[in-house]
Amino acid sequence: MSKYTTGEIAKLCGVSVRTVQYYDDRGILVPSELSEG
């Protein structure tokens, strides 16, 4: 399974890192797996 950073997800989706963080904070984006870091 591929793992992406917040920045990579933002770039792939054409949005800002802050937008991805906002969606994550609101529970809109739910990772299928979390890294230990």
Image (cartoon, rainbow, N blue to C red):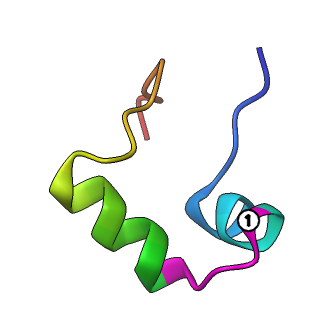
Question: In the figure, is residue 18 to the left or right of 28?
Answer: right
Span of residues in magenta: 13-17
Which residue, given by chain and number where applicable, does mark 1 sit on? 13
Looking at the rendered image, the quarter that the N terminus falls into is top right
16 vs 5, nearest the viewer: 16
Location of residue 24 by image quarter: bottom left
Question: In the figure, is residue 1 to the left or right of 16?
Answer: right
In percent of width and height, residue 34 lies at 42, 27
Give the dominant element type of the magenta stretch: helix, strand or loop: loop
In percent of width and height, residue 17 lies at 54, 79
Task: Check disc 1 and give the amino acid type.
Answer: Cys
Question: In the figure, is residue 16 to the left or right of 26?
Answer: right
In percent of width and height, residue 15 lies at 64, 80
Residue at coordinates 70% horizontally, 33% vertically from top-left?
3
Position of residue 31 relative to residue 21, above or below, is: above
Position of residue 12 relative to residue 18, above or below, is: above
Position of residue 32 relative to residue 23, above or below, is: above
Residue at coordinates 20% horizontally, 60% vertically from top-left?
25
In percent of width and height, residue 37 lies at 43, 41
Location of residue 22 by image quarter: bottom left
Q: Please, which residue is most extreme toward the top here?
A: 1
